[in-house]
Image (spheres, helix red, strand yellow):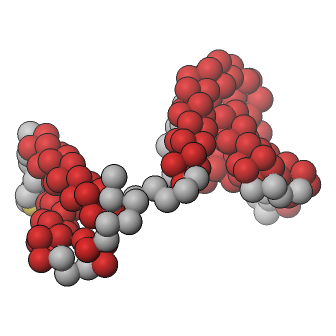
Amino acid sequence: MSTRTAELLMAVIMALASIALMYKSSELPIGWIAEEGPGGGAFPFWLSAVMLVCCLWTLFNWFKRATPQSRSDEPYFPGDAFVQFLIGAGSLGVMIGLIHFIGVYGAIPFLIIFYMRFVGDHSWGLTLLLAFGMPIIILLFFEKMLTITLPKGMTEQLFVDYVYDWMYTDWFAWLGSDD
């Protein structure tokens, strides 16, 4: 497949996805609701509308052959790029599959270890630091700061028994109180 064909294919697919998202989002109010703010479908609808405009602009440029990509007959995946794509997509697919069993916080270290150590050839020290540091940062950001619960799979009881106790204790109790 040439770069020109790939650009056309992606613009058409994304435009169709935009239309489908706009249709689905319009099942909820997409305008401003007095004394409440934007309706439940407003953000996805208007974001999809902007995405559709971008797709139409890409198609317009494609027909005019206005961009280097729209004129290119070079292969879209030169050399081993397709293999790299399969490695990336496959590893993400495995991580998503692992989320059901070991949760987000268990699946992320596997992905980071695979990518950093075996694809990126980074040192074990840096790999392990990020593989086990990032889930802690993500946990504190999503669950403590934003109060958004992420999937935990079979590790749910571990979080209930230990992690949440640690996370929701008063971290500054050691400072004492002035009462």
State which quadrant residue 92 falls in: top right
Q: Position of residue 87 (x, y in %)?
A: 60, 42
Viewer-side residue, 55 vs 110:
55
Q: Is residue 96 left or right of residue 13?
A: right
Viewer-side residue, 148 vs 134:
134
- Whether residue 15 is visible here, answered yes or no, is yes
The residue that appears at 8% across and 58% down in the rendered structure is: 31
Viewer-side residue, 45 vs 58:
58
Q: Position of residue 79 (x, y in %)?
A: 55, 56
- Above-or-below relation of 69 to 93: below
The residue that appears at 40% across and 60% down in the rendered structure is: 75
- Number of marks in the rendered image: 0
Q: Is residue 72 left or right of residue 135?
A: left
Q: Is residue 17 left or right of residue 23?
A: right
Q: Position of residue 37 (x, y in %)?
A: 17, 59
The residue that appears at 61% across and 27% down in the rendered structure is: 98
- Whether residue 131 is visible here, answered yes or no, is no
Q: Position of residue 147 (x, y in %)?
A: 52, 45
Q: Is residue 120 left or right of residue 61?
A: right
State which quadrant residue 91 falls in: top right
The residue that appears at 90% across and 51% down in the rendered structure is: 124
* The C terminus: image quadrant: bottom right
Viewer-side residue, 175 vs 127:
127
- Above-or-below relation of 84 to 64: above
| The residue positioned farthest toward the bottom in the image shown | 66
